[in-house]
Image (cartoon, coloured by chain):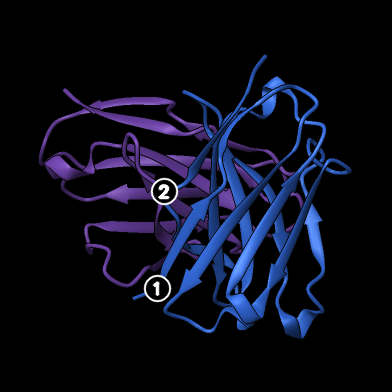
Amino acid sequence: EVQLVESGGGLVQPGGSLRLSCAASGFTFSDHYMDWVRQAPGKGLEWVGRSRNKANSYTTEYAASVKGRFTISRDDSKNSLYLQMNSLKTEDTAVYYCARGGGDYRHFDCWGRGTLVTVSS
Amino acid sequence: DIQLTQSPSFLSASVGDRVTITCRASQGISSYLAWYQQKPGKAPKLLIYAASTLQSGVPSRFSGSASGTEFTLTISSLQPEDFATYYCQQLSSYPITFGQGTRLEIK
């Protein structure tokens, strides 16, 4: 069974840092693009960023709202995706989901349950 | 950035109704359009990708179509479990963007 499980969320003060993890199982992790998506309370979905697969040199893309503050990395030996979040702002408060970019269109065919990040003083 | 505009933002319908949700892209995205369903407190679920391809395991009452920059999600006969929020998404170019969502509620 394909599964994604996020962890690492919590309460952090503005300006602080947090590292989220996403543990993958049930598929060949290194073959896949992986994404982070967030959802602020009561709001819609916002794409955060992407890690391409090994075949595409693990290159990354980011939304403008997080570029320079957030960094996506992965460890294929641990089947894990990470999101390092620095200089956090109150507007970064959201549930953060990891998702698998599958197929030729890299649509998000599998999602984790999400982890809540609250940025507040 | 490519903007996706969904309409309507809110839809009230009854079990058995046929409903259509529209997603308009601000520029051409070929078939790089997906649809997701999200229920409260849950992660989104992929319904349709490549504009019209039904994801494995999704009931056949869901269908997608495209005409230029206009995309539609149709539910042929609403079931109680279909009441949720629906999002379109474009994967044609970065940044990947989502529509604002369509909330489908029971009349």
For the residue marked with disc 1, what is the amino acid? Val
Q: Which mark is residue A2?
A: 1
| Quadrant of the image occupied by residue A31 | bottom right
Q: Nearer the viewer, residue B54 or B84?
A: B84
Q: Where does residue B8 sit, x and y in percent of width and height? A: 42, 28
Q: Chain of mark 1?
A: A
**CA–CA distance in space, label 1 to label 2:** 15 Å
Name the residue located 27 percent from the left edge and 63 percent from the top edge: B58
Q: Nearer the viewer, mark 1 or mark 2?
A: 1
Q: Colour of chain B?
A: purple
**Residue underneath mark 2:** B44
Residue B21, x across and y down, in percent: 39, 40
**Apparent colour of chain A:** blue
Q: Is residue A40 above or below residue A56?
A: above
Disc 1 residue crowd, few under 14, some 14–19, many 20+, Cα 10 Å: few
CB under 8 Å between callouts 1 and 2? Answer: no
Residue A115 locus on image (x, y percent): 50, 43
Query: Which of A111/B4 is in front?
Result: A111
CA neighbours of label 2 inside 10 A, class few (<14), some (14 to 19), many (20+): many
From the viewer's perspective, is A40 left or right of A68? left
